[in-house]
Image (spheres, rainbow, N blue to C red):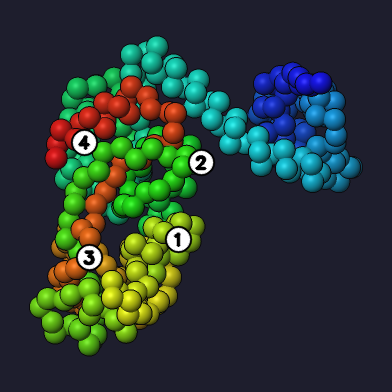
Amino acid sequence: MEVVISLELRELECFLVLAEELHFGRTAERLYLTQSRVSQLLRALERRIGGRLVERTSRKVSLTPLGQEFLDTLRPAYAGLERVVANIQETAAGGGGTLRIGFQGTANDNILAAVATFQEEHPCCLIEVTELPLNDPFGALRRGEVDSAVVMLPVAEDDLVLGPTFSEQPQTLTVSVKHPLAGRSQLDVEDLADTVLIAVAPPAPGYWRQAQAPMQTPSGALVGRGPEIRTLQEGLSMIAANRGGMLLCRPTAELNQRADIIHIPITGLPHSALGLVWRRGEETPSLKAFAAALMDDQ
């Protein structure tokens, strides 16, 4: 027999705030409730769930193992529900509000032109641009901190949609002026054999990290793995210290000219490219309009 459990949004909201504050008084203040009402909502939720979610003593409040498991599952689902409501509100308002775009590195001319075009055509919708960590291209998107993200390809995430791709660029190998290859004017991908490439640290997925710092050449020759970095600036510092090289697209290389490093064109590798990604099932009117502007400004 199928069992149907009815849940109240106010109970879920109360639990989420309590799990964050771990204090009944502060939870009551944030929700504009009395402490006794917070307790009532928690007890009602626990009855629906069929188990204790919170342990409360005279000294502290803590989540039970069941409560922690429920929190880990509920938090993204509740955030998704909030986004659904926000998306419908945006549709009802005719595309107003705010569109939050994350990007890796420096916003290039394509992105800036698309932002300008979008703002001119949709003055009621404000675009906020946020820089994303090099080593976490999808985290802010999944946490709901941005509505869409411009990231380096490849993208192969089941819960994300890859929209327009753009800014295809040849790659360079960036090394210290003391590196054995520093005197070369041109390189082939096979020249990476027995060299060391600085790697991107997790949480970026393995396939994405491999694309930025391959561990072997097309012929199968091994490429050494250097220190792991989280930001481009960390990478440039490691390069200057002669700890290894990095593959950078030509525009990024041109923006990061320094006396202690050198950028060498390299052939035999796929061109780098950028893509606009968003959460599956959450394509809002504003997001569609921005994606169209991005394609129009290629």
Q: Quadrant of residue 30?
A: top right
- Residue ID at (17%, 30%): 117
- Residue ID at (44%, 46%): 157
Instruction: Note whether 69 is above or below 236 in the view shown.
Output: above
Along the polypeptide, which appears first: circle 1 or circle 4? Answer: 1
Q: Nearer the viewer, residue 59 or 79?
A: 79
Q: Quadrant of residue 184?
A: bottom left
Q: Nearer the viewer, residue 108 or 208?
A: 208
Asked if residue 14 can be seen in this view, the reply is: yes
Q: Which mark is residue 168?
A: none
The secondary element bearing badge 2 is classed as: loop
Residue receiving disc 4: 294
The secondary element bearing badge 1 is classed as: helix
Q: What's the amino acid at mark 3? A: Leu
Binning the other alpha carbons within 10 Å of mark 4 as few (below 14), some (14 to 19) or many (20 upward) gives many
**Is label 3 or label 2 in front?**
3
Q: From the image, which quarter does the C terminus lie in?
A: top left
Residue receiving disc 3: 269
The secondary element bearing badge 4 is classed as: helix
**Is label 4 or label 3 in front?**
3
Check if mark 4's residue and mark 3's residue have beta carbons within 8 Å.
no
Q: Quadrant of residue 209?
A: bottom left
Binning the other alpha carbons within 10 Å of mark 1 as few (below 14), some (14 to 19) or many (20 upward) gives few
- Residue ID at (72%, 21%): 7
Along the polypeptide, which appears first: circle 4 or circle 3? Answer: 3
Check if mark 2's residue and mark 4's residue have beta carbons within 8 Å.
no
Residue receiving disc 1: 206
Check if mark 1's residue and mark 3's residue have beta carbons within 8 Å.
no
Q: What's the amino acid at mark 4? A: Leu
Check if mark 1's residue and mark 4's residue have beta carbons within 8 Å.
no
